[in-house]
Structures are given as C-alpha cells and as structure tokens.
Image (spheres, helix red, strand yellow):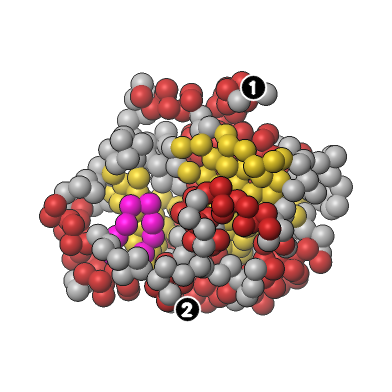
Amino acid sequence: MGLRISGAGCSLIDYLYTNIDFTDTSLQKYFSRLPGDGGITPGKLVFADEFERFCGTAFPEAVEEITGGRKPDALNLGGPAIVALINTAQLLSGRDVHIDFYGSMGKDETGNRIIEIISKTPVNIDHYKKTDGISPSTIVLSDPNYDNGNGERAFINNIGAAWNIRPEDLGESFFDADIVLFGATGLVPRLHDGLTGLCRQAKQKGCITVVSTVFDFRNEKKEPGKRWPLGESDETYRLTDLLITDREEALRLSGMESTEDAVSWFQDRGVGALIVTCGAENLHIYSQGNLFCRQKHTTLPISEQVGIDLRKDLVKAGDTTGCGDNFTGGVIASVAEQCTFGKDKVKEQIDLIEAVAWGVASGGFACLHVGGTYLEDTPGEKREKIERYHSLYLKQVGR
C-alpha cells in the first residue's frame, strides 16, 4: 500500500450565515467584553453552553435575533480536522495515498448528514464512530466587510459527541501511518488533554506528526489570560514535526506578546517546523532543519491573485469559512507529495516554502466558495483549480 495519512479531530455541520454586521449596535449585547466570558468575538470560537450563560438567553432565541430569524445561507461540512483531510485527499487525487479520519458523532440526523457529505469525498471514515449524544455543530457568523473588507467569522460551537472520543479510542491502526494529523484538538477535549502522549506514540511508530490548533475557549474560560496548555506538557512541541497555528493562538500558547517572540518560544521548545498564519497579513515560518529544510524565521505574503479575483468579484457567494483548515490540508498534501511513498523514506528534506505555497493556494481558494468543504464533480477538479494559485504564488515569492 502507498502512503497512509491518519487524522483525528472534530467533524461537524456548519450552519453558515453570511452578511452579518458585527458593528450592528443591536447585536453588541452578544459580543464578548472580557476574555473567556462566553460572548462572541470575531475570529474566535465560543461554546454554546458558555454563550447561553453569557447572554442569559436560550441559544435558539439568541441566534434568531443575531441572524434576523432567517435560515442559514448554507449548510456545510466543517471541523478543522475533517476539512483539512478532505482537501489533502482532493489534492492528492490519483496518487497512491490512503487517508483515514478518526472521530466521534451522535446517532442523529446531523450525524447522518455528516456521513452523507463525507462519503462524496476520498476520505475513509471506517474509524468515525457513532456514540451517545448529539453530533457536533457550529453556527458560523460571517461579516464580509470586517477588517477593512478582508472579512471575518465568529463561531458558536456545540461540542456534543466530540466529548466522547478518548486517546485510547484511536487504537493501533491510527499510528500505522506515514503522516498523522491532530487537527484542532481543542474541539475534542479528551484528545487535546492527552496530546503529548499521542504525539509520543506517533513518533515511536515513525510517523510525521502535524498539529494544528484552534482557539482554546475551554482553557481560556478556565484561566482567563493564562498560557494555554497543549497536551499534558510542553514536551508536545518537541514531538511535533510541524505546528500550524494562527497568530492569536500562537500568542496564547506561548504566553508571548508578539509573533516574533512567540516564534522564538516555539523554537526553544524544540518544535520541528512552524507556520503562523495572520489572516490577511504575512504569515511566519521557521524550521530547525531536521525533517524540513532549515529555514530561519521569515515571513511570507498571502496570495495576490486570490485578492485580485476577490476584488473582481468573480465569485459573489464566497466567504472565509474553512480557509485555515484548507490551508492545513494543502500543506499536508505537499508534505505527502514530497515524501517517497513508504515509511521513513523522505526525498532529502521537505521544502517548507513549497508546502506553504500549497497551503496559501488552498486557503485562498476557500474564499471563493461558501463553507470549508468543496465537493468535486470529478476527481482532480479541485487540484486543477488550485494549481493556478499555487504556480502564481511561487512566482510571487520568487520561486
């Protein structure tokens, strides 16, 4: 069998509401005033039960007021882990790659809908188990005019059955892989709390370990303003070949006040390679030179071509939902392509900038359609569309 990729994390249904105005004064009572207080914050996630306590209003009633009582503009498959893996699988269409998702859903109609959507993608879900509780879902509120027209979203998440998956539920099969992704485990709390041990087990099995993060509302609520843990100890970083995080998450994980200091902090903790995304601003990358080619801390831009296409309004219905998740999937696809199929056999070292180029192209393309998951009509369709942005981005950065 060819190259194997295993991913664990959250899969859910996104209920997408576009054209929400975050500056609308009638909605301000729902917005956060203090860190971790349970209110909505652009760019961040809050859990539904905390949100209810914050606003003192039943969750359905609050959502009805925020959205003006309209139905969602779209219903899409979401969840940082599954969306990343789907993009990885689509970009690797036609190659000898097997991709497995491990997660937990409820025995309900939402779970059936999740299965129906994933079955239209190349990702294998034999290890995606039905358990007690409701299937996870997220209300996604999107304001396309926020941040000077760059757009931003706010998320209200119901963890539901994602509470049920534990480290021991992954089993030995999860680690029978060349690459493993622990995708935004803040949304699967028991995996998140056991992340150090999971990464250690993966490294003992010879896997390439990729960890992506999400705003950790649970730990922020527990100790507002304190540094977030990532697993049982900071050993998680030494056991991580590639850490993908955004600026806010990097600052909170490190306890630093600037991106530059956060990158230095991760370097000191021994992370193999690092990508810090910053929305519409330049992203930061670093590699210590083991699995990935040595790369001193540097910054790279986002895609100019995506910005041009958005300004031309080539696709009127797009939003920024799933950009980061697709970015992660693009990076993993490139890592897989740069590896010789077969465990522990890597073609020299992996080029981090090449991997970032596929990430940037994938994340940018996600802005051109609603929701994070793009369902192809034919295999290879998505890769063909993204290749244009990838090649133009390499020219943009002088490669």
Q: Nearer the viewer, residue 131 or 394?
A: 394
Question: Looking at the picture, how far across and down is residue 392, in whole percent?
Answer: 57, 22
The residue segment tinted magenta is: 38-46
Q: Is residue 279 left or right of residue 398?
A: left
Q: Is residue 381 left or right of residue 198?
A: left
**Residue found at x 67% / y 54%:** 267
Residue 391: image quadrant is: top right
> Is 40 part of what is drawn in magenta?
yes
Residue 7 showing in the rendered view: no
Question: Looking at the picture, how far across and down is residue 153, in whole percent?
Answer: 35, 49
**Residue found at x 63% / y 75%:** 232
Circle 1: element type? loop
Residue bearing the label numbered 1: 398
Q: Is residue 12 left or right of residue 190?
A: left
Question: Looking at the picture, how far across and down is residue 288, in whole percent?
Answer: 74, 48
Q: Is residue 179 above or below residue 372?
A: below
Residue 344 showing in the rendered view: yes
